[in-house]
Image (cartoon, grey):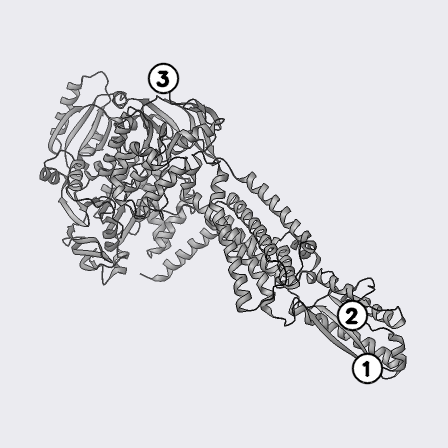
Amino acid sequence: MSAPAIVVQGVTKTFGETPALRGVSLSVAAGELFGLVGPDGAGKSTMFRVLTTLLVPDAGSATVMGHDVVRDLWAIRSLVGYMPGRFALYADLSVEENLRFFASVFGTSIEAGYDLIAPIYRQIEPFRDRRAGALSGGMKQKLALSCALVHRPQLLLLDEPTTGVDAVSRREFWDLLDELRASGLTIVASTPYMDEASRCDRIGLMQDGRVLAIDAPAAIGAQFPRALFAVHGGPRARMIAELRRYPFVASAYPFGETVHFSDRRLAESPDTIRRELADYLAVADLQEVRVAPIAPGIEDTFMELMGESPSVAA
Amino acid sequence: MSARPALLAFMRKEVRHLLRDRQTLAILLLLPIAQLLLFGFAVRTDIHAVRVAVVAPASDAASAALRTRFANSGRFQLLPAVPHADSLESLLRRGQLDVGVVLPPRLADRLTAGEATRVLVVSDAIDPNTGTTMQTYAIAILRDWQDALGAARGAVRIETRLRMRFNPTLESVNLFVPGLIALILTMVTSLMTAISLSREKERGTFEVLLVSPLHPWQIIVGKVLPYLALAMANVVSVLLAAWLVFHVPFQGSVSLLLSASMLFALVGLAFGVLIAAITNSQLAAMLAALGGTMLPNTMLSGLIFPVTSMPLPLQLLTNIVPARWFIEIVRGIMLKGVGLSVLWPQLLILSVMLAVLLTLAIRRTNVRLA
Amino acid sequence: MNTPAIVARNLTRRFGTFTAVDHISFEVQSGEVFGFLGANGAGKTTAIRMLTGLLAPSEGEATVAGYDIRTAADRVRERIGYMSQRFSLYDDLTVRENIRLYGGIYGLQDDEIARRSEVMLGELEFTPPVTAMVRALPLGWKQKLAFSVALLHQPAVVFLDEPTGGVDPITRRQFWELIYRAAAKGTTVFVTTHYLDEAEYCDRLSIMVDGKVAALGTPAALKAEFSVASLDDVFVTLARGTASSGERSP
């Protein structure tokens, strides 16, 4: 087992009166695809800035590839590929000019890094003379990723690379990340989209500067403390109202087509719960009611953990 | 729907925005006041403390009387007597004298004999406004002195002949070209680099550049050098235009002028980098650059209003305005034809300013975001 | 109310030689929650700008809240509300100041504003003080408040542009409960979103691809039409079906 790529211990960072990170600890293994998952304000960007040595923690320590973020900043800055949010690109330079510039900043060339970026760059290469400002969101994203990769970094840090981009491009982007991870690169990416998070090896759930949980996606789901059911039927608003009126309800939240329901009673078997709920709903004025057990997902667990955390956002 | 309440609501909002952006508000309130004060104190159409020397071949009552008159005039500052008319030239060139009065030899005898005597008045009319005024004052005093003598000894005519050197045609363009070069250099260097650097930060690309082997200083130099090249190109084009189109005289060394321009440009660049380092936004950077360069350069550099006519506090302030020294250098080279031997103090001052600004800029440029 | 809240017929907008919106037609009924989906650059923003009276169409016509967007754009704007992710409330004004501002802009009298604001804040169960700066509010409160403020003048139609971007999952759902409450009262909600589970919450939705409406219907109908299990797959099928040009800005 090789040494971890990233070790963060008790990092705290406060801006004025706002604590952005509160005693965060995590580690990322070499070659792992690690996801930082959480809403805006969770502290993801601040965490990235600490790891890229742009910010010094007020307390705690962090090492990247064995280098301390405070003392060895130059070592870290040479081996990290960083993609901050909002695709920091030069809008008035062309695709190729942007890439060439970022390559030269690291003392290398497009040719030297070409085989690594090829799967990505090939998709935008036909537009190499186009001004970066004239690209669609998905294309900008791919260009920004190419620019972060062209110098063959050992670690890729991507801050919300898929925010504001359409669903198809998001999917393609994560396919690319899968390929890169297969080549041995360590990747840390943050995202507010829980469905993307399930594509990571491990994820860290963050909220209000704290880490709520760290584990593989499936295991995160397993942390949900009760049996979970997907309830079909409509109209949805009435269904939710009925479920919330149910005497044993612990949680009832819409999840796309269905409503995820969990029962307060831990002693009862899932079968009993399902049956009793179905009976209860049968007499309500609802159509096509179906109750089926499901495995909890990341979002279910996230919401559960949020509820336990004192500073829930309203 | 009535429009007025909506309009009022909107105005109230704008006022709140304005009041809460403290940084911009401070600059916008202070800038006009600073301008007002500067205009009030620096703008002088009258002049005083004109340095005058009276050259007389021999000390006699007449020349002593003239000297006393100048000394008591309240507008003139008498220099110790100089022996020869030849030294006037170098004093005027070095900027140590404003007006020279040359009395003819055997003044006393001539006056006694009732011969016509000619008195020469030489003014440093680099600045057409003040040049004429100084002359007028000098002539007024001479006339009084002449009347006093004439009344005592009968009718004696003294003719004054005026010579204005260094700007014989009193062309405004000769006056303004040096100042224009200073303004252009400042605009291209300080203003543009401050904006360019702060825009990079606002755009977010600066963050990515920091996370690379590049030291922030490499980033800054890389951004700033093209503006230096642009500034020098501007200087050359302005000089060419001034020479070809307006026939502005060029007495001195071109290479010295270009070197001095580069030095001044570097000062401007260092200042621009410093501004970008201490401001938070492009807007603040722009306002700070304008307030910190354009305003002093027009008001306090001697471009329009002569330094010697300003009240003492402002005169002291002009010492830290780089443009003031640069304009002296350019005027000296272009119009007076002087060189390193005369201008070394100004060049030294500019070099010291560059060193100070660079040190400050280096200190404030962060290897990190915070 | 039988007249549809929004009617668009062959609505088109060109920028030079580039056609951003290409003859789109649809209707939205009163009180409907209508999802307006599409990739960035597909023409959504341009279409919304036309419907909100900010941009004149090159061709075609539309009525919103009963008024023609070409001839009565200012009347349209009186009758609609708008909220986007990027901009909702002024950060450097307090909660109360924001409410008064928007109330004032829409011509409400001071006492009316006070009354409606009290009701609104009560319904939201708004706990922070009204003298708090908006920038100090957690994102979730900001977005919910912004939505409520957009409804303060009781518009017939409210346009929401990615209102839940970056917000935590619980707040997102609370936000949609607010949307349902508004729709139940008769307000038509026209919403765009990148969260495909939120697309499921809509009564009907349209998906724009390359300036055209490529799909229109209830979530269930769309899934059946494309024989897929989720709206995500509908989206992907549609997007991949067209030749992607890779660049969409005019």
Type of amino acid under label 1? Arg
> Label 1 to label 2, Cα distance in Å?
17 Å
SS at badge 3? loop
- Picture coordinates of residue A33 (x, y %)? 30, 26
Type of amino acid under label 3? Ser
Marked residue chain, label 1: B
> Label 2 to label 3, Cα distance in Å?
92 Å
Please determine whether, in this image, residue A169 is positioned above or below residue B244.
above
Q: What's the mark number on residue C196?
A: none
- Badge 2 is on which residue? B101
Q: Residue at x 85, y 80 (%)?
A: B150
Asked which quadrant contains residue B340, the reply is bottom right
Marked residue chain, label 3: A
> Label 3 to label 1, Cα distance in Å?
107 Å
SS at badge 2? strand
Q: What's the mark number on residue B157?
A: 1
- Badge 3 is on which residue? A2
Q: Which of B40 and A5 is in front in this view?
A: A5
